[in-house]
Structures are given as structure tokens and as C-alpha cells.
């Protein structure tokens, strides 16, 4: 019982903490700049100081400044993609959790699928070769030899 | 050949991961390299009535060092910067980032001032335009005001000798 309460608590906090932390900033959301749009945007952006956190979840000074910057840009009427471009121009693709698709990132995007396909093809070929191996046709003399071996009376093997 | 395939795959993977281990994920390459220094205008740290702007960098190779009194590694770097300033080979400008004016002035009084001048970026907005995400950071700016290089983290004597000085000499020769 206690254990399940703890698990429930952890799961609950996982869902709520990001919201709560970004809520510390006390931004005034109105008009086009809805809290939902803001949260959605900052959770797509990486905090460069604590690299495993999004801007939404980080309490680093820089993350606070960048949240304010994002908020101000949104207030000045910038679209989501303009805000993202602003940050990418200054901090590079690394601020994005989802890297853009371009020649230098093709390996990153396609690599896992390519690896999966290659492995799958290799596996299928290997398996089909193995099943072919079982379809060995025996000549009559070989069959006779098998029969002979099977019916050979060996007292040791007949313990069953 | 076939027998060695797993070994080859293993070696390739190990090689890939070994290269990965030598990279520092904290060092994010700046997209600003090769581009003009972002325009800014800021009051000076010591004389708030005077301003500094991005035109300051035109006509010579200069360094812009982002520093703050709250930044521990800046203090370690300070001696190196002072030594660089003393060689007279390059002008070092400071960007005092998200700091208290009085504390910063006192800091320079105690440890010495290697900067030609320091700009005072109280709210860190200019820092954001320069893609600053940690202090110290040092930019190399050429005669045309284009950012040529960025050192993330403290400048050490080795970095000065092996990265910065050769680059500065090269840029000066290009004129």
C-alpha cells in the first residue's frame, strides 16, 4: 500500500513539476500569448546550462532569462517559428530537442531505421538459409542406413 | 570475411563511441562564428555615462571576454587575461554579464583590470544576443567586426598559446 502510494506520488510529480516550475515566472498571459502556447514552446527548447532539462523545467538563471526572452518575443507578436529561429540563430540547433532534418543530421534521423532494416534483412536471410538446410533429401541408401541405426538393438540405450 | 563481421561492427561502434568520449557536451559550437558581431550598445562599467557599441571592434583584432564576479572560473582566468593584456598583442574588451556594478568595479580594483573597457550588461540581454550561456566565454573578433572564434570556459595559457595567439597573428596578417 505504502509502496503504491509512493509510486503514485512520483508519477503525479512527473506530470506536474514542469508546469509548476515554469509557473514561478509570473508571466501575464493574455490574447495570443496563451500559457499553453508558451509552455508548449519552452518545453521544446533545451536549457544550455543543464542540458538534460528543457527551458520549461529549468531553474538555471539562463533558462529564466531565455523564458523571459521567449515571452517578450511572443508578446511582440512573433510566431512560434520566429521565436525558435531567434534562439537557433544565437545558440545553434542544440537548443532544439528535435534536431532539424538536413544533410548533416540525416545519419541521426535515418540511422536507427537503416540499422533496423539491415539487421532485419540479415536475420531473415539467416533464418531462411537455416530452414533450407533442413530440407535435405536423403538417398535411398542413406535412409536404409538410418533405419538400420535406429533399429539396432543396443541394450544401454533401451533403459527406458 | 563473414566470420570477422561482428568484430568489424564492434570496432566501428567502439571507434564511434571513443570519438564521442573525447567531445565535451558542455561546449556547444556557436552559430555566430563567421558572422558579424551582434549589434549592441551598452554603458561602460566604470563610466556609466559613456557607451560602447559593436563599432568599437572595427579596424583591429580584439577579444571580448564575458565575465562576472559571481563566476568562479572567471577568477582563475583573470590572471591569464592580465598576462595576455600585458603582452600588448591584442585588445581585450570585457562584457560584465548579469552582475552588480559596485561588486564588479571592486573586483577589478582588487584583481587588476586587463580590459580596455568593460561593457555593463545588467540584465544579460546582450549576452543572449551573443549566444552566451555560461561564463567565462571569449570571442575573437576580426578587423571587419566578424566573430572568428569562441572559447567556452576559462582561457588558459595553453589555449592562448595554441589557439588564440596563432589565430590573432593570422588575422592580423590578412589585414
Image (spheres, rainbow, N blue to C red):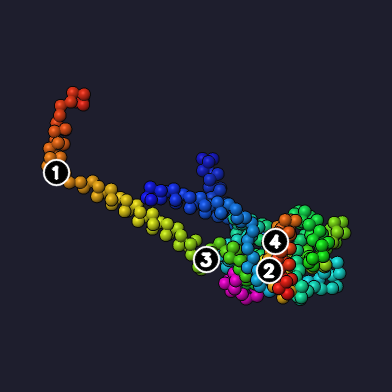
Residue indicated by mark 2: B148
* Res A139 label: 1
**Disc 3 and disc 2 in contact, CB within 8 angstroms:** no
Residue holding disc 4: B163
**Residue labelled with disc 3:** A104
* 4 or 3: mark nearer the eye: 4
| Name of the residue lying farthest toward the front | B173
Spot occupied by residue A150 in the image (x, y as percentages of width and height): 16, 33
Could you give the CA–CA distance between mark 2 and mark 1, rounded to whole angstroms? 79 Å
Q: Chain of mark 4?
A: B
Which residue is painted at 45% across and 62% down in the image?
A110
Q: Are marks 3 and 2 on the same chain?
A: no
Which of marks 3 and 1 precedes in the sequence? 3
**Are discs 1 and 3 located on one and the same chain?**
yes
Q: CA distance from mark 1 to mark 4?
A: 77 Å
Share a chain, discs 4 and 3? Answer: no
- N-term-proximal mark, 2 vs 4: 2
Name the residue located 14 percent from the left edge and 31 percent from the top edge: A151
Residue at disc 3, secondary structure: helix
Mark 3 Cα within 10 Å, few/some/many (few <14, many 20+)? few
Magenta highlight on residue B47: no
**Element type at mark 2:** strand
Say if residue B38 shows up in the picture: no
Residue at 44% x, 51% y: name it: B9
Badge 1: chain ID: A
Q: In front: mark 1 or mark 3?
A: 1
Tag 1–tag 3 contact (CB < 8 Å): no
Q: Describe residue B80's horizontal placement relative to residue A9 as left or right.
A: right
Task: Give the crowd class for mark 2: few <14, some 14-19, many >=20 residues within 10 Å.
Answer: some
Q: Position of residue A60 (x, y in %)?
A: 68, 57
Amino acid at each position: 500500500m505504502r509502496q503504491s502510494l509512493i509510486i503514485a506520488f512520483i508519477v503525479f510529480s512527473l506530470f506536474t513539476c514542469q508546469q509548476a516550475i515554469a509557473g514561478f515566472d509570473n508571466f501575464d498571459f493574455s490574447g495570443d500569448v496563451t500559457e499553453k502556447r508558451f509552455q508548449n514552446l519552452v518545453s521544446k527548447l533545451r536549457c544550455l546550462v543543464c542540458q538534460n532539462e528543457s527551458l520549461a523545467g529549468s531553474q538555471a538563471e539562463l533558462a529564466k532569462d531565455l523564458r523571459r526572452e521567449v515571452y517578450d518575443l511572443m508578446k511582440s507578436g512573433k510566431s512560434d517559428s520566429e521565436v525558435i529561429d531567434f534562439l537557433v540563430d544565437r545558440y545553434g540547433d542544440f537548443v532544439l530537442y528535435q534536431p532539424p532534418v538536413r544533410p548533416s543530421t540525416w545519419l541521426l534521423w535515418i540511422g536507427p531505421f537503416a540499422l533496423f532494416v539491415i539487421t532485419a534483412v540479415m536475420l531473415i536471410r539467416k533464418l531462411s538459409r537455416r530452414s533450407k538446410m533442413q530440407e535435405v533429401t536423403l538417398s535411398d541408401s542413406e535412409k536404409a542406413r538410418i533405419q538400420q541405426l535406429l533399429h539396432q538393438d543396443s541394450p544401454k540405450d533401451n533403459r527406458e | 570475411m563473414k566470420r570477422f563481421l561482428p568484430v568489424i561492427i564492434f570496432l566501428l561502434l567502439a571507434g564511434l563511441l571513443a570519438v564521442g568520449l573525447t567531445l565535451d557536451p558542455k561546449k556547444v559550437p556557436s552559430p555566430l562564428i563567421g558572422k558579424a558581431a551582434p549589434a549592441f550598445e551598452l554603458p561602460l562599467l566604470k563610466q556609466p555615462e559613456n557607451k560602447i557599441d559593436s563599432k568599437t571592434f572595427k579596424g583591429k583584432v580584439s577579444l571580448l571576454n564575458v565575465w562576472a564576479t559571481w563566476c568562479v572560473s572567471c577568477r582563475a582566468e583573470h590572471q591569464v587575461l592580465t598576462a595576455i593584456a600585458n603582452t600588448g598583442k591584442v585588445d581585450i574588451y570585457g562584457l560584465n554579464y548579469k552582475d552588480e556594478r559596485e561588486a564588479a568595479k571592486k573586483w577589478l580594483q582588487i584583481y587588476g583590470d586587463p580590459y580596455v573597457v568593460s561593457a555593463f550588461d545588467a540584465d544579460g540581454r546582450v549576452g543572449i544576443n551573443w549566444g552566451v550561456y555560461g561564463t567565462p566565454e571569449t570571442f575573437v573578433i576580426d578587423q571587419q567586426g566578424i566573430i572568428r572564434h569562441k572559447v567556452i570556459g576559462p582561457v588558459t595559457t595553453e589555449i592562448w598559446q595554441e589557439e588564440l595567439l596563432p589565430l590573432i597573428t593570422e588575422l592580423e596578417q590578412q589585414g
